Amino acid sequence: MTQLAHGRHPSATMPHYEFRLAISPEQYLAYYKGTIKQVIVTCDNGQRLQFPAALLRQFVSQHGIQGNFELQCDEQGRNATLIRRR
């Protein structure tokens, strides 16, 4: 089982999705301005996932958003939490 950056383990009943992001600072401007409100990614397992762009704000740097991430949500697909994986 993978340990997450904040020390929690994904629950067997809590859906989680793993993916890589590479968004340049210029590309992120559309998300920041609110022009684009949803992000669509392809997960490591090939599944497509859509989530609110607002979840990305905490990960923005001068280089944009780069890295491996995990999105966790409840069984209804709500209350999403985005975590940068190590």
Image: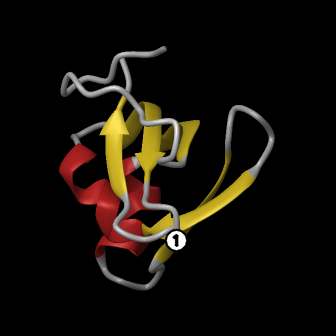
**Is 33 placed left or right of 1 in the picture?**
left
Q: Is residue 1 above or below residue 73?
A: above
Local crowd at mark 1 within 10 Å, few (<14), some, or many (≥20)?
few
Image position, residue 7 (x, y; %): 20, 22
At a point 51% along the width and 74% down the height, the residue shown is: 38
At a point 42% along the width and 73% down the height, the residue shown is: 30
Quadrant into which the C terminus falls: top left
* Residue that sits furthest to the front in the current view: 13
Front residue of 13 and 59: 13
- At numbered mark 1, what does the secondary structure look like: helix, strand or loop? loop
**Is 6 placed left or right of 13 in the picture?**
left
Q: Is residue 75 above or below residue 59?
A: below
At a point 35% along the width and 26% down the height, the residue shown is: 9
Count of marks, rendered view: 1
Front residue of 66 and 50: 50
At a point 67% along the width and 41% down the height, the residue shown is: 43
Q: Describe the colour scheme in one phrase.
A: secondary structure
**Is 78 placed left or right of 18 in the picture?**
left
Q: Is residue 16 above or below residue 37?
A: above
Amino acid on which disc 1 is placed: Gln
Image position, residue 2 (x, y; %): 44, 16
* Residue that sits furthest to the right in the current view: 46
Q: Which residue, given by chain and number where applicable, does mark 1 sit on?
A: 76
* Residue that sits furthest to the bottom in the current view: 35
Q: Quadrant of residue 64?
A: top left
Front residue of 27 and 2: 2
Image position, residue 27 (x, y; %): 47, 59
